[in-house]
Structures are given as structure tokens and as C-alpha cells.
Image (cartoon, rainbow, N blue to C red):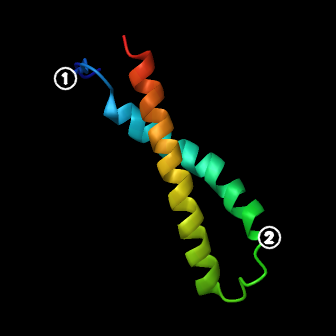
Amino acid sequence: MPEHIETTSPEGVDYGWVMQVTFVLTIVVGAPVVAVLSFGVPALETWMERVLFAIRVGAVVWIITAVSVFLYARRTQV
């Protein structure tokens, strides 16, 4: 078994954890949000309109998730 080479002890917010959790939550939360909101938009006739809609909604979901996860990490840091 190889020796453990690297350890980390972040001071403050662990940004790696924040990025990983943001990525997972954005997919888990964002996909259903985009799907549900797309039902209310009748003008999504072409694939380009659908892609642009998903990007616009996904960006909002991503920024809200990222800020929320960061604030949670900062509040709960030891």
C-alpha cells in the first residue's frame, strides 16, 4: 500500500469542498428547476432557444447555489 503523501488542513473556508458541493447541488437542483420552468415557456421551438433558456436559468441556479454553499461553509467552519 502506498504511503499517504499529501494532507491538507485549510484555514477558513475549504474552497475545494465548496466547489464540489456546488457542482453536485447545481446538477441535482438545477436540472429539475430548468425542466419545470421550461413548461411555462411556450416559445422554446428550436434547440438553440432551449439551450439558451437552460443556460440562463442554470446560471441563476448556479450562482444562488454557490453563494449559499459558501455562506454555509463560512458559518459552520471550526
**Mark 2 sits on what residue?**
40
Which of the two marks, 1 or 2, is nearer to us in this view?
2
In percent of width and height, residue 24 lies at: 54, 43
**Counting residues from the N terminus, which is met first, the one under dot 1 or under dot 2?**
1
Q: Looking at the image, which residue sits at the far top?
A: 78
Q: Position of residue 23 (x, y in %)?
A: 48, 46
- State the residue lying farthest toward the bottom: 46
The vertical placement of 2 against 60, above or below, is above
Residue 5: image tag: 1
User: In the orientation shown, which residue stands out farthest toward the left?
Assistant: 5
Residue at screen point 66% across, 57% down: 31
Q: Is 9 rendered above or below residue 63?
A: above
**Which residue is painted at 79% across and 81% down in the image?**
42
Question: How far across and how far down the image is residue 15, in percent?
Answer: 33, 34
Quarter of the C terminus within the rendering: top left
Q: How many neighbours does mark 2 have within 10 angstroms: few (below 14), some (14-19), or many (20 or more)?
A: few
Indicate the quadrant containing the N terminus: top left, top right, bottom left or bottom right: top left
Say what secondary structure mark 2 lies in: loop
Is 2 or 75 nearer to us in this picture?
75
Amino acid under disc 1: Ile
Q: Residue at x 58, y 77 (%)?
A: 51
Q: Tell me which amino acid carries mark 2.
A: Gly
